[in-house]
Image (cartoon, helix red, strand yellow):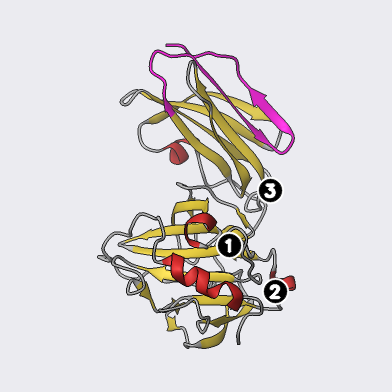
Amino acid sequence: MKIRGFTAGAALLLSLVGAVALAPAASATGAQPNFQVPFPCGQTWSGNKASGAHTSWEIDFSRAGAAADLGDTVVASAAGTVAVSANQGSVNGFGNLVKIDHGGGWTTFYAHLRVRSVSAGTRVSAGQKIGEVGNTTKPGASLAAHLHFEVRTSGTYPANVQKAVFNGVPFGYPKQSVTSKNCGGGGGGGGTNPYSPEKICGSGYTVIDSAALGSAGKAYLLYNKTNGRNCVTTVKSASLGKASAVSAYLEVQGKSRVTDAGNFDYYAGPVTAAGAKKCVKWGGKVGATVYDSVFEHCG
């Protein structure tokens, strides 16, 4: 099945995709993760590699037609860390792209998203929402809404694109309808946020201040004595697993403000900057609730 409207942009994507400006994956030294279909548990999608833009084992997923698919939830195929969350349209035609590093040299690509629900550096679980099906691509070009999905290891494109295996079963190239058994976390909207500020900012960071954002979340300021850097993250406590407006910022006195803002499932940030012996202004926002500090913590 050919996805309507995709052929017009195929030559463009084919000519640009080899030049993708992304850091190459590490050597595939680890076993292949137990990848799952990148859609919520129980959904059935039609996968197709026959697009003219494909030269290897890429898959385009559609379900009910371009208009109906637009905005459908896309989830992580396996646990990992978000390596890229950016609009890559001008670089390679992928439009809104999320790339997840699963360790051992394995990565997955989720392209043409309408929105991205996670930021770079986010640790995600299998089944966690990372974005929505979209049609973003090269400026001035057009695509029908679909999800472009790839599994990659190291090496040169397209040889590094691997055949997809979902729940231990190889995908039936060139096309097949598959039902998701991706029934892990991330889809809910309630419960406890699995991410602490220390986990988000990383090893060596300690919370030195925080500010509640009503019942919706909390903004945190952390400091790392070893490297003299501050870190700010805004952690949600409501609408968990559902993309909603969240932001975090950090401004070292005399320097430009660093901000991370978007529709995220669990938190915004981390934003970091060198702040030893400098005053900092920091804050965050969840929905309409905002916290802005004065310049403080000047030690």
Mark 3 or 1, which is nearer the eye? Answer: 1
Q: Earlier in the sequence, mark 3 or mark 1?
A: 1
Q: Mark 2, residues whose alpha carbon is within 10 Å: few (<14), some, or many (≥20)?
A: some
Q: Measured along the vertical axis of the image, is residue 156 above or below residue 291?
A: below
Q: Which is more foreground, mark 3 or mark 2?
A: 2
Give neighbour class at mark 3: few <14, some 14-19, many 20+ (Cα, 10 Å).
some
User: Relative to 127, is 219 above or below?
Assistant: above
Work out whether mark 3 precedes mark 2 in sequence or the reverse, and give the earlier one: 2
Q: Is residue 180 visible?
A: no
The quarter of the picture where the C terminus appears is top left
Q: Is residue 109 left or right of residue 145?
A: left
Numbered marks: total: 3
Please state the extent of the stretch shown in magenta in the rendering: 273-299
At 33% from the left and 71% from the top, the residue drawn is 160
Residue 244 can be seen in this image: yes
- Asked whether 286 falls inside the magenta stretch, the response is yes
Looking at the image, residue 255 sits to the left or right of residue 102; the answer is right
Report the disc number at residue 209.
Answer: none
Looking at the rendering, which quadrant does residue 185 occupy? bottom right
Q: Quadrant of residue 112?
A: bottom right
Residue type, numbered disc 2: Ala
List the residue tagged with mark 3.
Answer: 239
**Which sits earlier in the primary sequence, circle 2 or circle 1?**
2
Q: How far across and how far down the image is residue 117, in percent?
A: 59, 52
Q: Residue at x 58, y 62 (%)?
A: 137
Check disc 1 and report the residue beneath it: 137
The amino acid on which the numbered mark 3 sits, given as a three-letter code, is Ser
Secondary structure beneath dot 2 equals helix
Tag shown at residue 66: 2
Pick the front one: 277 or 161: 161
Q: Is residue 235 above or below residue 84?
A: above
